[in-house]
Image: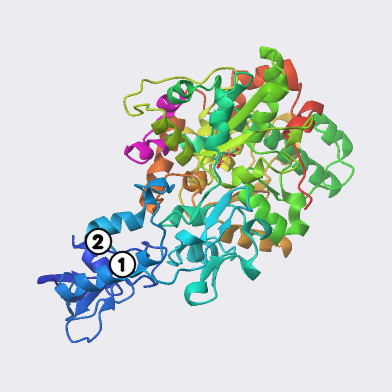
Amino acid sequence: MINLTINGKALAVPDGTTILEAAKDNGINIPHLCYLKDVHQSGACRMCVVEVEGMKNLQASCISQAKEGMVIHTNTGRVRNARKVLFELLMSDHPKDCLICSRNNHCEIQDLGEQIQVQNSRFEGSKSKSSLDNSSWAIEKDDSKCILCKRCVTVCNEIQGVGILNTQNRGFEATVAGGLDLPLGETVCTNCGQCVTVCPTGALKERDAITPVWDAIMDPKKVVVVQTAPAVRVALGEEFDMEPGSNVTGKMAKALEELGFDHVFDTNFAADLTIIEEGTELLVRLVNHLFHQGAIDEEAVKKTGLPLLAEPPALPMITSCSPGWIKYAEHAFPQQLEHLSTCKSPHMMLGALIKTYYASVIKVRPEDLYVVSIMPCTAKKYEIKRPEMVNDDLPNVDAVLTTRELGKMIKDAGIDFVALEEGEFENPLGLSSGAADIFGVTGGVMEAALRTVYELVTGREIPFEKLRVEPMKGLDRIKVASLTIEDPLEAFEFLQGVPVSIASTSGLVGATMLLDEIQQGTSPHLFIEVMGCPGGCISGGGQPRMTTDEIRQKRMEGLYREDEKKVLRKSHENPFIEQIYSNFLEKPLGHRSHELLHTNYTM
Ligand code: HC1
């Protein structure tokens, strides 16, 4: 332990602790701006300066380690004055349009100005050249609001390993931009939005969908249908100062109805559908792999009722519901795209069903339907614009609102969210199993798939207590599990004793590691789940700011609680899934499914 004194208080802190953390952990708040716990400590803004006895210059406390015997002052006149001057200098090159800024009242500079009591800036002079980059379908970058704190650079390079954003040029020419100063939409940006979640100002934000959605709601000729992703229900409450992880499914359904949406459905229904389609696809790949290896004959394949493929399929199969991950795979691993499941992501599947099946049920022309997805993810704004996500010349989904944008609409409409009574999703496209809830957390899609596939092959529930596939739970970067198939049904008897290895990862660094193994031919896995954001959709780029590890944990627990309280825990038990196959889709991987629910990524 290190012994030091801060503001006259004797403290003992673990070796390696910074002065800022030592103070924070002991209830002493040093104002700071660019520092972000566990993510970014660069001292770039220098707002966290302190006086250390024996040192001539003020020290940036976020990058200065606590040392034995240090005597530190965080609140002297010299420190306070320095902070104010630094803040004034920062503001001299920052727009003063706070009232019409998207971050008004949620801006870290505003909060800091209030905290250190600066109401004026004495310095007016040169300004940075500023530009607005709205070339991306997902993310908008406004350089005039950038304070060069470089949090986004750290997240893009070190947390996600994508490496698009970097500081360019110097002085008043300095900006954060993609390589070669290309507009974001022309770079290999995955649209994950992790940069947006850490930006302290309005410099990085999602592309607005609020305006077109209000327009559609107000248009009497449009029937506006909304669906909500699994992870939104445990985070939306944070926009209304509720505890992270609070489950607000019922309030959210009610709020959507009050906003004027004509039909309120649940993406979770399509998550259950995804499990049926993707689980069947996995079995088809596995059985055909064994056939092409010569391990089983044609007769054995026929007995399973699964189709025989002319070519050996690619294994491991990798999940395809995270559009940030898909774009990353297209850029970084173009030779491995055949490993991606052909399933569209659940909200795209639901959009396709709404504009075909549901349009005929309610007798509305598909072109008069406007489908809105509420997503925790900024990359979903890009996904809906992909040319693959169209059927009969109509986009499957028309607009994506982030969790944050939905919060703004609810506030705009004057709805008292916390006091709202519980509403319900409309059926048949609103019922879901617990397996669908856990799609929103890393490892959840894998667990949901295992609950169903194991039962399809053996006729029994997966042998884990209360269906929890423990090795898949948690926030580790890569999770690996294996299980052995015992006593399969007769049609799958050739799988007796076959060991199955699976892996899940969230964040693109882990994905790179697993894909490198595939590229080198050393991957031991049959099935891999990849989610583009660390922790899965619970920490997507569209979720309420800020997502810390503690908040991630609470949202994850919220989704597991939701799963555990459901009567239906497995996707194949959802009666409306059965109904949609008998009324419309006919069978998993059938002709209609192929047309509406599957695609190929060939970039
Ligand atoms: Fe996700 Fe998905 S889980 S991708 O993380 O497969 O965004 O929540 O909606 O579509 O269901 C996100 C979440 C979400 C899809 C589902």
Q: Residue 56: where, in percent of width, then height?
A: 22, 87
Q: Residue 234: where, in percent of width, then height?
A: 42, 37
The residue at which mark 2 appears reads as 118
The residue at which mark 1 appears reads as 88
Callout 2 secondary element:
loop
Write down which quadrant ligand 1 falls in. top right
Image quadrant of residue 393?
Answer: top right
Callout 1 secondary element:
helix
Q: Nearer the viewer, residue 355 or 529?
A: 355
Task: Give the answer, above or below, for where 328 lies relative to 126.
Answer: above
Disc 1 crowd rating (10 Å Cα; few below 14, some 14-19, many 20+) is: many
- Disc 2 residue type (three-letter): Val
> Residue 57 vs residue 145: left or right?
left
Q: Is mark 2 within 8 Å of ligand 1?
A: no
Task: Give the answer, above or below, for where 378 lies relative to 52.
Answer: above
Q: Measure the alpha-carbon separation of dots 2 and 1.
A: 8 Å
Span colored in magenta: 235-253
Q: Nearer the viewer, residue 125 or 70?
A: 125
